[in-house]
């Protein structure tokens, strides 16, 4: 029977196909007393050994696919499996208490997990999950069960309670039609991955989606969040048409992506891409990006034991700049903090890493480390239109200090006869409310503002991005956030400074009229979103958009903004 | 029985990678090695036990070794701690 489930649309598009259910396997076991403890002990030993063999293989694979640092977690799991005390404790419960292997294993591991969970330090508490993970792995082997399968043999829609990066790494991307998860919000890992792959996704659909039958035909609509299980012929036909027309539309939009985005009444705005690699940059150009509005540089720093040196950074930046040619590129200096681990800088443990020693704050305290990056950028920018952007700016003094270090870097290079790029613009990422509120005071110190709406929303609404309990407050279209955005654009223009946006909001079709009305100069987004965003811009009239912007800025809540925008004809 | 006292310097304490290195180093010796932090005692060759010590930055750990290579084991563990587990100071 046909059934509709409502979730949250996380990546646009319609997909129709058989459901592939990714479900954690049932590992329930019986407890009983054993007659032959030695045989039971042998079972545990063998299972631990098999688990270790599995983990070694996963570790090797992870090193190749995701790098040494990500793989480190599996190395820690191996060490836990080899733990002499773990084996000893299990042995004791089997020999003395005569309990079966499964129960001895799980009780012992659970004891350690609970001890760690009770600790005050969050880093230690997090290890409890690792112990439970190895316990499950070993138990699965004891029970003779297979690991939940994630190999797709035909094009499918993947349904899961939730997907972690390590799950998605296992997926064959060529067989993926779309995603649907019970958990998660619009900024979850699944949503971001789906957008990057250009696949439809629905998240936060609730546990009901796990009642599906494997192979059942399902329609998902990544725009509306609808999931239709077992659609009847008429529905199927409607959606096939819709999918084809969306595909047709996408093809039409893509073919027009190379042309500029000009509104009906003749205003041209810049549509550029957020990238983090050469591959992204190539994809950006295919999708009609007129430049890069955000080049993330963290990729160079993560997953390694030592800091990247100047030459290595130069090569990486130059490779991306060369892809973009004469197109402008905004490169953001390193943006990491206590939520990440860099073995070569002790970022320390912080209770609130997002309010802590991160990004520009950490860089200004480590001038030599920072200048290595600045020198690499200056060298690589020769012959290109490069703009340097500092993240996490809260005060004018920080930009001034960063600019001094930038000048020092330039002088050091030139003293050695090394050529640097000329006319490099310097700007800031506006993601801290303080910077937005004080925007006028940055005039004369910066050449541009780029608004990072994800963090600006988090800091304005005091909502941690990953906390589901408060997720309902986290919306970039909240009037509180919109007022800050409007303020930054207004002050920027008054001071003759251009204003861009590199947060998720810039690529959100329903937000585009609002942003056009506020006067945003540059829209930066994931490459896959560019063709549609350009098409939306071309359908708008700035005079109408100004009214829309004025109206929403006077609304009282996010819900009111949503309702208002839903009424506007696309 | 020889013993030494070390102070944990790195910011995150004796967890994850540093704890792993500590346990691995201890495992190279035949002696029985005990790590004591406050009221908690741990077999230095057991990662799970060492983690449950909950040694933070600034924690003092008494290490006691018993066996033919006890001195060498203590020296090696002290040197590892001195090197800050191969992590940069700041």
Image (spheres, coloured by chain):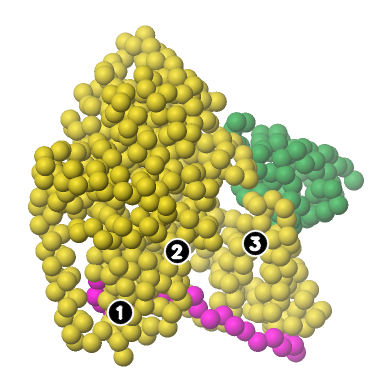
Chain colours: A yellow, B green
Q: Which residue is mark 3?
A: A128
- In terms of image quadrants, where is residue A30? bottom right
User: Which region is colored magenta?
Assistant: A15-36
Q: In the rendered image, which quarter contains the N terminus of chain A?
A: bottom left
The residue lying at 40 percent from left, 78 percent from top is A209
Q: Chain of mark 2?
A: A
A275 lies left or right of B13: left
**Considering only order in the chain, which callout, 3 or 1, is on the residue closer to the N terminus?**
3
Establish if A218 lies above or below A404: below
The residue lying at 69 percent from left, 46 percent from top is B14
Q: Which residue is mark 2?
A: A184
Label 2, residues with CA under 10 Å away: few <14, some 14-19, many ≥20? many
Q: In the rendered image, which quarter contains the C terminus of chain A?
A: bottom left
- How far is mark 1 from mark 3, CA to CA? 38 Å
Nearest to the eye among marks 2 and 3: give it. Answer: 2
User: Regarding mark 3 in the picture, which secondary structure is present there?
Assistant: helix
Are the numbered discs 1 and 3 placed on the same chain, yes or no? yes
């Amino acid at each position: 029977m046909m059934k509709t489930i409502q979730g949250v649309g996380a990546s646009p598009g319609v997909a129709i196909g058989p459901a592939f259910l990714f479900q954690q396997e049932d590992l329930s076991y019986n407890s009983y007393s054993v007659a032959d403890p030695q045989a039971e002990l042998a079972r545990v030993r063998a299972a631990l050994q098999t688990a270790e063999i599995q983990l070694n293989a996963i570790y090797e694979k992870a090193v190749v696919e995701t790098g040494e640092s990500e793989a480190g977690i599996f190395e820690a799991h191996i060490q836990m499996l080899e733990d002499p005390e773990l084996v000893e404790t299990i042995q004791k419960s089997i020999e003395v208490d005569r309990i079966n292997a499964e129960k001895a294993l799980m009780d012992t591991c659970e004891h350690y997990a609970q001890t760690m969970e009770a600790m005050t330090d969050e880093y230690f508490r997090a290890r409890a999950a690792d112990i439970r993970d190895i316990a499950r792995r070993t138990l699965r082997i004891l029970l003779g069960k297979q690991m939940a399968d994630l190999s797709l043999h035909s094009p499918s829609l993947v349904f899961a309670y939730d997907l972690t990066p390590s799950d998605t790494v296992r997926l064959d991307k060529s067989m993926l039609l779309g995603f649907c998860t019970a958990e998660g919000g619009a900024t979850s890992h699944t949503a971001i991955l789906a957008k990057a792959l250009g696949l439809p996704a629905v998240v936060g659909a609730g546990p009901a989606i796990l009642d599906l039958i494997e192979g059942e035909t399902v329609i998902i609509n990544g725009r509306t969040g609808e999931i239709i299980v077992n659609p009847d012929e008429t529905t199927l036909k409607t959606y096939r048409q819709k999918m084809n027309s969306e595909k047709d539309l996408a093809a039409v939009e893509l073919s027009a992506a190379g042309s500029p985005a000009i509104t009906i009444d003749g205003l041209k705005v810049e549509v550029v891409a957020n990238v983090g690699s050469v591959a992204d940059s190539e994809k950006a150009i295919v999708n009609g990006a007129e430049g890069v509005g955000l080049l993330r540089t963290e990729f160079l720093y993560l997953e390694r034991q030592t800091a990247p040196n100047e030459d290595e950074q130069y090569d990486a930046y130059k490779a991306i700049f060369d892809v973009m040619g004469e197109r402008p590129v905004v490169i953001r200096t390193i943006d990491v903090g206590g939520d990440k681990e860099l073995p070569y800088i002790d970022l320390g443990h912080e209770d609130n890493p997002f309010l802590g020693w991160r990004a520009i704050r950490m860089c200004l305290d480590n001038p030599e480390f920072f200048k290595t990056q600045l020198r690499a950028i200056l060298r690589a920018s020769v012959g290109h239109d490069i703009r340097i952007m500092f993240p996490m700016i809260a005060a004018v003094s920080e930009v001034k200090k960063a600019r001094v270090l930038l000048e020092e870097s330039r002088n050091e290079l030139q003293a050695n006869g090394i050529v640097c790029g000329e006319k490099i613009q310097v700007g800031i990422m506006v993601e801290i409310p303080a910077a937005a509120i004080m925007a006028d005071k940055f005039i004369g110190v910066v050449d541009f503002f780029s608004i990072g709406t994800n963090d600006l929303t988090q800091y304005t609404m005091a909502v941690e991005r990953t906390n589901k309990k408060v997720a309902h407050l986290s919306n970039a279209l909240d009037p509180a956030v919109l007022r800050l955005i409007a303020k930054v654009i207004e002050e920027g223009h008054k001071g003759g400074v251009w204003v861009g946006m590199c947060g998720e909001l810039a690529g959100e079709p329903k937000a585009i009229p609002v942003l056009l009305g506020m006067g945003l100069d540059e829209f930066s987004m994931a490459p896959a979103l560019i063709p549609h965003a350009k098409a939306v811009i071309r359908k708008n009239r700035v005079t109408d958009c100004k009214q829309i912007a004025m109206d929403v800025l006077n609304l009282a809540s996010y819900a009111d903004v949503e309702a208002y925008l839903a009424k506007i004809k696309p | 029985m020889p013993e030494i006292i070390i102070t944990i310097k790195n910011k995150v304490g004796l967890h994850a990678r540093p704890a792993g290195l500590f346990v691995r180093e201890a495992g190279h010796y035949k002696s029985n090695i005990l790590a004591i932090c406050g009221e908690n005692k741990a077999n230095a060759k057991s990662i799970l036990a060492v983690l449950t010590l909950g040694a933070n930055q600034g924690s003092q750990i008494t290490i006691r070794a018993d066996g033919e290579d006890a001195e060498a084991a203590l020296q090696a563990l002290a040197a590892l701690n001195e090197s800050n587990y191969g992590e940069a100071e700041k």
